[in-house]
Image: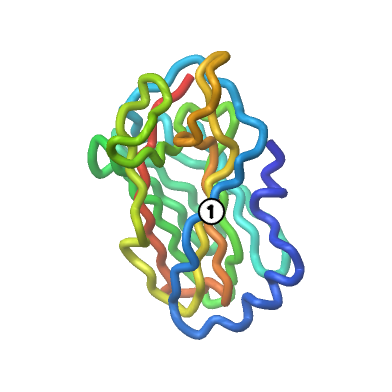
Amino acid sequence: MNPYSLVCGAAAALVVSSLASAQTFGGVNYSNLTPFTISTAAQTSGGAEFATLSCWVQRSNGTIEQPVFVQTSAASATATGSDFVVRMTRTSATATNIEVRATTASCDLYAVLVGHQQGRAAFDVTPVAAPSTSSSSTGFLAATPSTMIGAYTAIVTFEQPLRVGAAAPVLDMYKAVSFRFLGGFNAGDRFIYAVDTDRVG
């Protein structure tokens, strides 16, 4: 998986980014690239699994920063950048909050990507009563972010579907999720989105 293809937007998107004047949710997208094969999936994940994920952050000027997730509790891990924080917190058996928070006025985040092929956590978007990847049980996907503070439009994209062994992918579990912030993401801006995370191997 090439993280830069997931995080970096087209130049046209950077032009649009200057147009947002209030927080708006631009919806959820799915990029069904070649599936990645895993051996196992289980319902429970937490701070230890989150700490195995990578984090790529792109600013509007194109620069990339890669903070490292550090486990902060049994249920959470935090990646601290030079002027932003990305935090994952398990809140229930089927929900994890992913929070992005800017800490300086010059932060100007454009996109954040969380996930990695070798990471031990994945994102399970299975709605109730829908087909589900073997052993992943029921997932969860928030219809909208629980928190949006700032003047930006947020777009969520799930990247690279998973499959267990030789089974065909069900398109309910993904290896990465990205958040794009059109309009700039600066001091005081905050974004929280909930999705189920499963432990994978």
In the rendered structure, which amino acid carries the disc numbered 1? Asn
Q: Is residue 20 left or right of residue 137?
A: right
What x and y, as percent, mark residue 161? 55, 34
What x and y, as percent, mark residue 69? 48, 41
In which quadrant of the rendered image does the N terminus lie?
A: top right
What x and y, as percent, mark residue 37? 58, 21
In the picture shown, does residue 85 fall above or below 74? below
Residue at 48% x, 19% y is 201
Q: Secondary structure at mark 1?
A: strand
Residue at 36% x, 26% y is 136
State the image quarter where residue 10 is shown.
bottom right
Answer few, some or many: residues within 10 Å of disc 1's Cα (few below 14, many 20 plus, some between 14 and 19): few
Q: Is residue 157 left or right of residue 126?
A: right
For this orientation, the residue located farthest to the left is 92
Colour mode?
rainbow
| Residue carrying label 1 | 29
Residue at 53% x, 64% y is 83
Residue at 50% x, 56% y is 156
What x and y, as percent, mark residue 80? 49, 52
Q: Is residue 63 left or right of residue 134?
A: right
What is the tally of numbered marks visible in this picture?
1
* Towards the viewer: 14 or 141: 141
* Towards the viewer: 48 or 167: 167
